[in-house]
Image: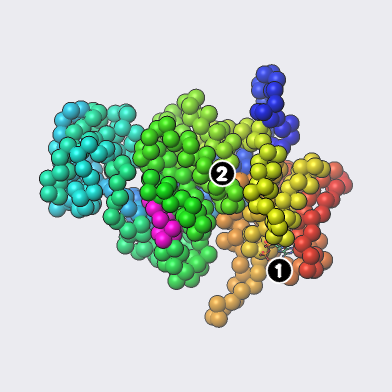
Amino acid sequence: MHSNHLLLEEPIRMASILEPSKSSFFPAMTKIVGTLGPTSRSVDVISGCLKAGMSVARFDFSWGDPEYHQETLENLRAAVKATKKLCAVMLDTVGAELQVVNNAEKTLQLQEDGKVILTPDHGQEASSEILPINFSGLSKAVKKGDTIFVGQYLFTGSETTSVWLEVDEVREEDVVCVIKNTATLTGSLFTLHASQVHIDLPTLSDKDKEVISTWGVKNKIDFLSLSYTRHAEDVREAREFLSKLGDLSQTHIFAKIENVEGLTHFDEILQEADGIILSRGNLGIDLPSEKVFLFQKAAVYKCNMAGKPAVVTRVVDSMTGNLRPTRAEATDVANAVLDGSDGILLGAETLRGLYPIETISIVGKICAEAEKVFNQDLYFKKTVKYVGEPMTHLESIASSAVRAAIKVKASVIICFTSSGRAARLIAKYRPTMPVLSVVIPRLKTNQLKWSFSGAFEARQSLIVRGLFPMLADPRHPAESTNATNESVLKVALDHGKASGVIKSHDRVVICQKVGDASVVKIIELED
Ligand SMILES: Nc1ncnc2c1ncn2[C@@H]1O[C@H](COP(=O)(O)OP(=O)(O)O)[C@@H](O)[C@H]1O
Ligand SMILES: C=C(OP(=O)(O)O)C(=O)O
Ligand SMILES: [K+]
Ligand SMILES: [Mg+2]
């Protein structure tokens, strides 16, 4: 993965492009979040997804009931056991999502130039003329000429399975729209997106709160994906809510930036959130097309500099029904990696797509190729400059570890950590080799019982580019003495060797505390 590093900024021999990619234990340093659903919920398929490189499973509560998602999660657990691949769990909220109320799951035909009425749900049936929706404030939010998209998840308004509407008239609580393209809407959930208007619905809905405090608590979710985050206050409120739910006080919040309102408040949101999801599905139609790439580059850069993971969505829509991505999609995945993203989030492609495993595998391969030409040197310099001086001790140690590892061509960096902070800081400097974060459990108490920390911290690094966690044996106390450091290191090296990332005679950089001092060590292995 880190061998024969090319740079796009230097002339590339065309023939070198054709050299086959070396297979490696890790499909890619970039992480893949897969949404699990109808076509990806059996133990077999999930096992395939894990082996192909999925390290976070997303459960989207915009559809499906808790029992359905629970069954899927039990299957995920069985797959994790069978494959011995770790996987984190992400709960995705409904948030301020507008939905068509279509309980009968009727197929709807909409005809170009015809009209359709959006009306608050008063028990009416959805039809080609009238679409009942879950929100009574739409008529107050929109005006003549506004754009509204309706579709089953993949709406673009340019194909035949989703529709683009233009507001023609507002009649009391109803919104009369002109249909701009002929479409057949099928499926169990049609969402609406009203472009660049504020939707006066809470970011954490009552249903979300209910799901988080039952399903979320029961399953100790690692990540909360906060749909339609529009203000920093949304994240603060979610944090406050989680803080009262026992273990969920440790859950990381990923703010989904899905519209211009969230984009406008990006800096404040980033400060409050643990990570960002660039929800290009919604945002991509809220923004003028020519601006989408610019948001992506700016947002990913800000996340990188803050050392917080950035996850990009909606990359290979066409693979929902096809075995190969389009050229544009394949190029887009690579560019997301070159921009500095930590992860790629697959939605419909894995949730109801026909080829979930193949999709993960192809996306992983594209990411791995892009990582090879990522200009780490330039990135490193930019980051050091951005952080400025004086650096905190830990950040200085972390960046030095990365620099040393590159200089000596180490095959991995091994980082000891309990909170996960040190490992994340190393990943911030985007080393070209994997970082094994050895999470050392800490004994903690909640006044009622003793337990070990570490599991959350380990799984939460599964969304950070380049981090590969390993949970150390809880019999090794967090207090670092030379003897425990040595025995834990041996376990980590053995793990690295068994998985193929470390070979005899390799150099390894180690970041750990010895007594009170944080140190960076370089070791050269024997046979
Ligand atoms: N149990 C441990 N044994 C040895 N070194 C450790 C341990 N935990 C953390 N370190 C090292 O201590 C420094 C601080 O790391 P950090 O992740 O912030 O620690 P903590 O988990 O205590 O917050 C880093 O150099 C890290 O590698
Ligand atoms: C991932 C997205 O959101 P949703 O939860 O609706 O799939 C998106 O808008 O890109
Ligand atoms: K959602
Ligand atoms: Mg969305």
Classed neighbour count for the residue bearing mark 2: other residues with Cα under 10 Å, few (<14), some (14–19), many (≥20)? some
Q: Quadrant of the N terminus?
A: top right
How far from the left and from the top, in percent, is residue 278?
46, 44
Q: Residue at x 74, y 31 (%)?
A: 4
Distance between mark 2 and mark 1 Cα atoms: 34 Å
Q: Which residue is mark 1?
A: 478
How far from the left and from the top, in percent, is residue 348?
41, 39
The amino acid type, in three-letter code, at marker 1 is Ala
Residue found at the far front of this picture: 389
User: Cβ(mark 1) to ligand 1 < 8 Å?
Assistant: yes
Start-end of magenta stretch: 223-235
Q: Quadrant of the C terminus?
A: top right
Q: Is residue 502 visible?
A: no
Residue found at the far left of this picture: 171
The amino acid type, in three-letter code, at marker 2 is Tyr
| For discs 2 and 1, the disc positioned in front in the rendered view | 2
How far from the left and from the top, in percent, is residue 356?
47, 38
Q: Is there CB contact under 8 Å for labels 2 and 1? A: no
Q: Is residue 458 visible?
A: yes
Residue 464 disc label: none
Q: Which residue is mark 2?
A: 301
